[in-house]
Image (tube, rainbow, N blue to C red):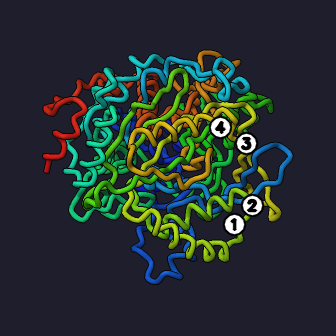
Amino acid sequence: MRDRPIDPAYSFDVIVIGSGMAGSVVAGRCAESGLKVLVLEKGDHPRWQGRKKGILARVLSTYDDGAGERWPTAVLVRKQEGQRYRESKAAVGIGPGGSARLYGAALGRAARIDFERDFQPPQWPEPYRDGAALLNAWPVAYDEFLAAYREAERLLAPLGTRDPLDPDDDALLGPPPRISPAHEALVARLADNGRHPFRMHVGIAYKPGCSECQGNTCPRDCKAHGFNRVLEPAMAKAAPVTLETTATVQTIERAAGGRWTVRGKNAAGEPVAFQAGKVVLAAGALNTPRLLEASAAIWDGAVPPLVGRGLMFHTNDMFAVENPEGLSFHGPRKVLAFRDHYLDGDLPLAECQSLGMVASPALIAVHLYRAMQQRGLGLGVFGKLAMRPIGQIGYRIYEGSEMFAAPLQDLPYADNRVTTVLDAEGHERIAITYRPRKELIARVKRLRQLVSEAFAPLKVRFPTAVGQPNYGHPMGTCRMGSAPDHSVVDARGQVWDCPGLYVADASAFPSSLGINPALTVAAHAIRVAEALVADAGAGSGQVQLDTPPREDTSPTGSVAASTAAS
């Protein structure tokens, strides 16, 4: 789909590659400032599909499910160089909206310490001591980044309450819906144990019939993401932006006069090329570095050594908390968070937050199957079928529990990376080399201990393997820094020594943070858009980042106040 025919001879101000959270925010903001923008997106608009009828049909269904929501081929994964790759389905979105169409809509800010501290395992005590990580303090001050956070919140309109432990949390939040009696009991339990729960910051509008749509495209457009909140409205206002879907980008090249050429193929497989003064890579942390690798001619064949390296994931650590007193959980499920264990001494841990999913047999079976895949034992359709009865058994254990997640902060190591390999049929595949370090395993175990104490005496169970990566949160493969010897892009997201070439997605993150990446991606993309507009001298249309905080009439971080909201 595109909103107008494209003349290949037409010269754009900005070409944006990808229309996920980052690409949509950059494109929409630049177009509304008067810049002529072309957005190239590999996928078409996803098609929402209802729940499949019949257990067998649901068990055998694949991730993309014919809806065009997810990356069409499995990624290749291994733990170390020299090992054989195995296939794994990564939760990578495709089409306008990208992965943010599928995400859980968690829109929390990172903490000041995430930006200011360089976490290094050699400085930690045993058993957390390990080899040195890449530099992971951010080259932009937290106070400078706050303005972008506020603007991202204005655009995405999250609901929730502020974190009572964070003096920097002046988040722009709408009132969340009332929580259930069981959640109120969990809040009381956490408070009795000295913790400080608050209403999780989520980009969900809770329209009538809302089911929170965790992991799928929302049919009611409840979930806020870059496309439906920024780029699509800009297109509706006839801003100078062209969206070209089913376009495959192959290389980026330098052109005359300091401009850039983007080459690829259209939906018919025909070669196309477009020119612009600026190019923004927003294809995601698994694809953006692969495009730079394929564009080695930019550097006369010598791709910067850190392109594709420093790959980070959060751990996929979930835990089930037993239902206090058998109360009802009826109502929204993605509701609670607490950051009492965001930092443990010098150790970066995570925000603990409602997962937003019920511990159903299908959910348990899926996670068991993924664990088998990671050990090379997926067995295809037969493996999925085998997990179903085990999921039923697990459901009896977890029935009535509330599921939580903790996106524990990963650190960047040079040998964790993403690249491109050719499979037996000659097709290019995303190839990941990633090994969880012993310090990460030790930090996961420490967080589990603290979580169990936080909910005591309620039972807390951990169904996921220790250190299992969340492949839906890739970050850090084109890291930002203050100098090219330890980074790929500068603090504005511009590739070193490549004026006009930017990275706007989570590739640029020098650290993974202890929180879901979506809001930080949007904020970084706003900063990239600001740089593009300023460089273009767009004048009165320049992006404004000084949005004042919205007045908060409820007590800071008060869960109790939010329970009375309708």
Q: Give me the C-alpha separation between circle 1 and circle 4.
A: 24 Å
The residue singled out by tag 3 in the image is 294
Farthest residue, direction right: 82
Is there a contact, CB below 8 Å, between mark 2 and mark 1?
yes
Question: Which mark is first along the chain, 3 or 4?
Answer: 3
Image depth: mark 2 or mark 4 in front: 2
Q: Secondary structure at mark 3?
A: helix
The residue singled out by tag 4 in the image is 311
Task: Tell me what residue is drawn at x 62 percent, y 44 percent.
Answer: 467
Q: Is residue 311 left or right of residue 181?
A: right
Q: Secondary structure at mark 4?
A: loop
Q: Secondary structure at mark 2?
A: loop
Task: Tell me what residue is drawn at x 41 percent, y 68 percent.
Answer: 48
Q: Is residue 331 left or right of residue 250?
A: left
Question: Which mark is first along the chain, 4 or 2?
Answer: 4
Task: Tell me what residue is drawn at x 27 percent, y 26 percent.
Answer: 170
Mark 2 residue type: Gly
Q: In the depicted view, which residue is nearer to us: 66 or 5? A: 66
The residue singled out by tag 2 in the image is 376
Question: Which mark is first along the chain, 3 or 2?
Answer: 3
Q: Give me the C-alpha separation between circle 2 and circle 1.
A: 6 Å
Q: In the depicted view, which residue is nearer to us: 75 or 187? A: 187
Mark 4 residue type: Leu
Question: Which mark is first along the chain, 4 or 1?
Answer: 4
